[in-house]
Amino acid sequence: MYGGDDVHITPGMQGYIDRNNAYLTKRTQYIRDVVKKWKFDTIAVHGLYTVQEAIEDYQGSIIEPIFMSPSQAFTDSDEMAAALAYLIPSWTYSRIANPSTYYYEWTMALLEGYGFDGETSACSTSSGMAAIMTAVQPFLVHKKHHVREPRNFVATAQCYGGTFQLFNVRLMEERDIECRWVEDPTNIDEWASKIDADTRFLYGELPSNPGMGFFDVQAVADLAHSHDLPLICDSTVATPALLRPICHGADIVVQSATKTLTSSGFGTSGAVIARNNLVANIDNDDLKKDFALYIKYLPNRDSGPNLHPMQAVLTLNDMRTLRSKIDLLSQSTMKVAEYLQAHPQVESVEYLGLHNHPLHELARKYMWLVDAQHDAAYGKPVNRYGHLLSFCVKGGAATARTFFDGLQRIWRATDLGRIKSVATIPAISTHQQQGEEGRKLAHIPPNLVRLCVGAEHPDDVIADLDQALHKAGSKTAVAATGRSD
Ligand SMILES: *Cc1c(COP(=O)(O)O)cnc(C)c1O
């Protein structure tokens, strides 16, 4: 019950409840009998928005309408009372829900749950950070009123800079909730050694941005569950087209949909996707039964990290072609990674697709282009590793900056996931705030360049890298000989 204990159900309200229960049963059947049988691409294109619904309710609009309205009108007080007590599906007020974000949420839930033999649901958020904050907060409550017990959680140190700040500063320094960093997430004993009776959840980013950290999701999920804890994964870099952690035992996935899911670059958005009936050591049945619905109805209603309906449809439109885009982008990135690895001015390349990468074998177990076996071009499963890579330029921080400043076509921006190639130096941008120590923990050296390869022809991306590396190389040569010409 989400609506409080003192809801008095009138006969009029009961009428609305019965009608809507029938609707919910029909929707569940439609998902089970129709949508869950579709391939990934079909779900990405249609989600739950149907021809029939469009014609009956939305004047035939083939694209999900953008509901800019802040609130929903009700027929009478019975319908209002039932809606506000969450007894009937309704959207009520756009901070809580909205018909446009509804379609976005269902597409997210179904794509992350593709191939998963169970139910998933999603809650939209205004950004990836809002998704992370709202996914972790419900597990950090004090279990008893007026008892201030110690709380901790265990997380991969190799993670997005914003996540590092959220965990280290907002939660640990400001609120005394301990974050226990795992330095080598492939070492299951290290995870296990950090768990105790006050632990609330495990958190892992994979592949990590920008260092390409990775871990055995199934093993970490099993470990979490053996302690009655949920595993939360940030799967932004992989997207559901390459990896779906819920299928491997994870309980919750957070997405910065700002990135590859909205590759066109129209705005910021996020989502929390959860399996129903998740594992947690919190005594709250609603939270465990349908986590995404729970945060949507209660904590997020009260704090307002909701997604704008306009943004929901913009992101949704980009997601329709996710699978084929990530395939193309991954193939180009592989070519770029191979080029960089062979270049004398490059010290090292972090890309999970490279056969000599220490985490390649592990990543190969998990990162597959969804439905490649149903793709006429392949007809069998194929591995793909996404379009993010990072590399160290030989000659230290100054040379890395010369290279970076020399880029002509590749954009210098703290961004990734775009249809356009974008590069950044994490130590002076995304990971600047966490300081030298924090960067060391997260393996972010000062000469590390993060590159996200776009949909340009890979030869042109390589040509730009080549001329910039040449500039950096000649500057190093000058410095070494002390000569200038
Ligand atoms: C960008 C990013 C985030 C934060 O997402 P925003 O949409 O920028 O708030 C979280 N995790 C990863 C891996 C990211 O790349």
Image (spheres, grey):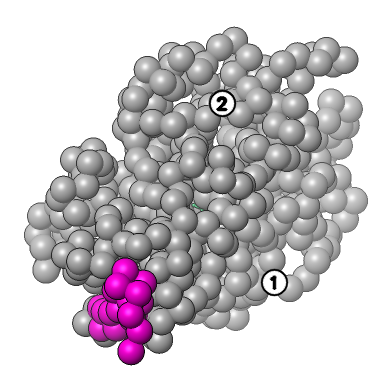
Label 1 vs label 2: CA separation?
42 Å
Within-10-Å neighbours for mark 1: few <14, some 14–19, many 20+: some
Taking the spot 35% from the left edge, 74% from the top edge, the residue there is 482
Residue type, numbered disc 1: Phe
Say which quadrant the C terminus sits in. bottom left
Q: Is residue 453 above or below residue 39?
A: below
Residue type, numbered disc 2: Arg
Horizontal placement of 371 versus 16: left or right? Answer: left
Q: Are marks 1 and 2 in contact (CB under 8 Å)?
A: no
SS for callout 1: loop
Residue nearest the viewer, comparing 55 with 160: 160
| Residue bounds of the magenta highlight | 462-485
Residue nearest the viewer, comparing 426 with 336: 426
Horizontal placement of 329 versus 309: left or right? Answer: left
Point out which mark residue 11 bears: none
Mark 1 lies on residue: 67
SS for callout 2: strand
On the question of residue 258 being in view, the answer is yes
Find residue 294 and report its image quarter. top right
Mark 2 lies on residue: 180
Q: In x, y percent, where is residue 199?
A: 59, 18
